Structure formats: C-alpha cells, structure tokens
Image: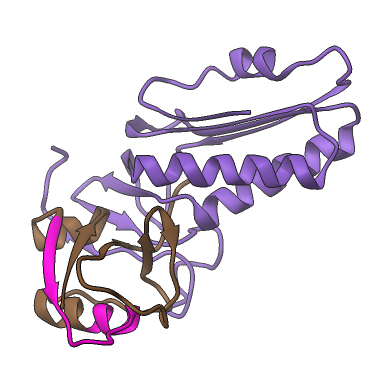
Chain colours: A purple, B brown
Amino acid sequence: MITRIVQEPIDLGDLVRQVQRPECGAVGTFLGVVREPNLGHRTLTIDYHAFPEMAQKVMAEIAGEAAARWEIGEVAIVHRIGRLAVGEASVAIVVSAPHRQAALEATAYAIEELKKRVPIWKKETFKGGEVWIEGDSAAAPPSDPAGGARGKIRKGRSAG
Amino acid sequence: MKVRVQLFASYREAVGKEWIEQELPAGARVQDLLESVGACHGLSLSPGRTLVARNLKYVGAETPLEEGDELVLLPPLSGGA
C-alpha cells in the first residue's frame, strides 16, 4: 500500500500507474480539489496542516481495512499539505481491483474514513480574513449551528 | 500529577505554543484534562468535538491519565477536499 503526506502537487496519473496490477481490471480514483466558494467565502488559498506521524499511521490503518473488506489489488492514499490554490488537488485515493464494484466501494470507504479519522486541518484564506475550518463542511449546511463545519473568523488579517 | 500536552492547528495558534504542561489531580481522566486546559488557556474544548490522542491513538473521555503522559489535543478534523 502507498500512504503519504506530501508537500508537492499530487500526480494522479502516476498513482494510477503505481497501483495497477495485471490481474486488476478496475482502478477507482477519487481526487479532492480546493474549491471556491466555501462556506459562503470567496476562497483564495487553503493551508493544510497535519499531525504527520499520526496521519501516516491512520492512513495505513484505513488502507489495511479496505484491503481486508474488499478484494482489491493495491491502494494509494495521498494527502498534500501546505498552501494550495483553488483547483489544486489536496487528496487522492486510488484503488485497483479485479472488478469495478470493489474498486469503487473501497475508494469511497477510504475517503470517508480519511475525513473522519486522519488528523489534518485546513485554514482558509479569503478576501478580508482567514478561518480554521473545523469539521466536515459537506456534513451539514454552514447555517446549521448544531453541526457541520465551523470556523473562527479573524477578519482583517492578510494572507501571510 | 503533571502531563505534557501537544496542541495542533487552531488550538496551537490560539495558545501560541506547541507544547504546554498541565497539572491535574490524581485519578484525572481525559475529560478532566479538557476542562483544565480549556479553563487555563481560554479554549473551548469538549469531548464531543476535541479529539485526544496518546501514542498516536485516539483515546476516549473516560481514559485515565498517568503522571508524565504525553497527550495530543486535536481540533475537529477537516482534511480531504
């Protein structure tokens, strides 16, 4: 399995080549990309911070769980940290398997578990401020005070 | 007893330090640590949102602590896209 925290851009094609196996007729891929707007802001950049030792360990656990639950060939989980611009990939999951259902299900499992368990955070810089994103911004609408992502907005700080 | 606490992300930024030391009564558990650090450093910590790890493993609010433990306080995660 391939599990990495990287600073450099993620090359999805290279990961696909690394997980391909002769007996695998399917490669499932997920690419997470910095979007704007997020939570109603015009995002400029996102800084990803990790607890690298633990992130690496939890990513390896997730890859192992995927291999135990589905018949797959190889799995790659790669998360980028540092400052990313809109459109750049922050995370890639790539799974090869003999058949498509296992590849797709294992790919979905890995990204969902990564979001719940891998210690990585993002700090978003937008025009006029910056905010730590806390929690999964897809889990609930930002207007819901009881759930979903929250942030502590610090207005007036420029992107540093 | 005294434990060492490593902070990440918004917690580290709010406190201005990566590592802090926290004095706790004997028999303290993870939830006592959260209350104590929250009160001392003005952080809003709760077992429902704050994650705590020891030796690279998540530990629950009821986990007993020991003198010299090194704990990690993690804000709600936001990795992925």
Q: Which of B14/A19 is in front?
A: A19
Q: Residue B48: where, in percent of width, then height? A: 43, 78
Queried whether the magenta region covers residue A76, the answer comes back as no
Queried whether the magenta region covers residue B34, the answer comes back as yes
Q: Is residue B21 left or right of residue B80?
A: left
Q: Is residue B70 left or right of residue B15?
A: right
Q: Is residue B60 left or right of residue A138?
A: left
Q: Residue B51: where, in percent of width, then height? A: 39, 67
Q: Which of A130/A106 is in front?
A: A106
Look at 40% across and 57% down and name the residue there.
Answer: A40
Look at 12% across and 43% down and name the residue there.
Answer: A158
Picture quarter with the N terminus of chain B: bottom left
The total of numbered circles placed on residues is 0
Look at 67% across and 41% down and name the residue there.
Answer: A64
Compared with A89, A50 (above or below) is below
Look at 41% across and 51% down and name the residue there.
Answer: A119
Q: Residue A96: where, in percent of width, then height? A: 77, 26
Confirm whether residue A11 shows in the render.
yes
Confirm whether residue B80 shows in the render.
no
Q: Is residue A126 left or right of residue A64?
A: left
Residue A92 occupies quadrant:
top right
Compared with A92, B41 (above or below) is below
Compared with A31, A64 (above or below) is below
Q: Residue A68: where, in percent of width, then height? A: 77, 44
* Residue segment shown in magenta: B19-35
Q: Which of A80/A35 is in front?
A: A80
Residue A111 occupies quadrant:
top right
Residue B25 occupies quadrant:
bottom left
